[in-house]
Amino acid sequence: MAEQSNKPTTGRNLRTVTGKTFLNGLASSMMRAVMQPFVLSLGAPMSTLGLLESLGGMHGLLPSVLQYYSGWLSDRLGRKPFLLLANACGVLGVGLLVVAALTGNWLWLVPGFVLVWATMMGDPVDRSVVAESSPISGRGAAYSLLMMAYAAPGIFAPALGGWMAGRWGFVPVFALEALLYAAGLLLVLRFLRETFHRAGERISWSKLKAATRQLVVPPRGLRGYYWTMAVDSFAWGLTLSLLFGMLTLTYGFSTFQLGIMSSLMALTWTLSQWPVGKLIDRFGSKPMMLASQLGGIPIVLSLAFASSFPAFAAIYACVGVMAATWMPAQVAILANSTSERGVGEAMGRLAAFQGLVGFPAPFVAGLLYDRFGFRAPLLAGLALIVVTIVMLAVLVKEPPRESA
């Protein structure tokens, strides 16, 4: 039986998760501007950077699978332990990046990358807390608030991180990021109250094996949605996962310039997120997701044929509007298709499926860049974006607004 929270605890947990998300967003947005130039500065080729992103990037294999298990286990053991573990991985992972910077050995990047992106195991748990604490009719706005907390630090943090790296090197940037992950860990430890678990349930090997088999089998009734999200992950893994590294090698952009680009993207994301959340609640998730993907076509085409920093900065700023339109809609449609008992598992299961299908994309992008140049991964991703639009229109069905 679910242990439901009272209203004060619900509000407290929402504030705690939002605060932790802000701190994690601050750390990750600083890293966004410096990570790929840092990897390349240690002598790793673009294909190696792609392999690291495939293993431990946003939709990398290991973090995606971890999200499934953290969601599945948090539905049975509680939310708090997995939020603490996620931020602890951030502290340890950034520490290994410091070791790589001090030794000049890029091999330290492999465990560092994986641990830093393993902080994403907290994503399905965060979203479960939001789902438990908001009505179905208001989830678009609630998830938009969570996304705003993550995106808002990106307005200033990437430019700050890029400037720090250019002036003092990468180590001070990583040290600050470790402190931010540690602060998020302490916030959860002190203020989060457990709101949902199945009292007395034991986790057996047989249950864990059964859950593992579900990794490769989308749930009945959501198969079209799962495959559409997986193709979307592969498409955008080709187009955006290595963009900063490609701009560094092709056009010689500095970490400060990349930070400005990331900050502009975060600004448009933050400013558009709240009104978009209201539109999702009013018109539904699927129309917003279609609008996002259709907007991606001119964005990717423009990136492929731009050649100056102002042009790239303006185009990349438009990615923020696309993210604001896509991400809460994607989460809301899944949450509204799932009972509250299984939200954590559902969020993690989707992330794992996306990761299993989409994780090779950055590595493929690196190979395409090494062989054919800057435009090749962008145009390959564009073709898959068109496929995603067709799949979204035909295969994805939105649940009735009043159902859970």
Image (cartoon, rainbow, N blue to C red):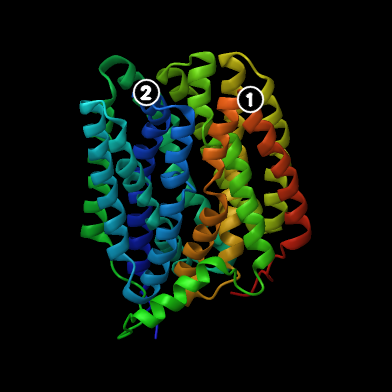
Residue 276: x, y in percent?
A: 62, 47
**Does dot 2 land on a helix, a strand or a loop?**
loop
- Residue 208, which numbered label? none
| First in sequence: mark 1 vs mark 2 | 2
Q: Amino acid at mark 1?
A: Phe
Question: Quick check: 135 above or below 320?
Answer: below
Mark 1 residue crowding within 10 angstroms, few (<14) / some (14–19) / many (20+): few
Q: Position of residue 397 (x, y in %)?
A: 72, 65
Say which residue label 2 marks. 43
Picture quadrant where residue 239 is located:
top right
Asked whether 384 or 274 is in front, the reply is 384
Of 135 and 385, the residue lying toward us: 385
Mark 2, residues whose alpha carbon is within 10 Å: few (<14), some, or many (≥20)?
A: few
The residue sitting at 70% across, 37% down in the picture is 382
In the rendered structure, which amino acid carries the disc numbered 2? Gly
On the rendered structure, is 368 left or right of 31?
Answer: right
Q: Looking at the image, can residue 112 be seen?
A: yes
Judging from the image, what secondary structure is the residue with disc 1 in?
helix
Residue nearer the viewer, 372 or 36: 372
Disc sitting over residue 372 in the figure:
1
Residue 361 found in image quarter: top right
Q: Residue at x 60, y 26 (%)?
A: 371
Q: Position of residue 228 (x, y in %)?
A: 67, 56
Residue at (70, 56) in percent of width and height:
286
Quadrant of the image containing the N terminus: bottom left
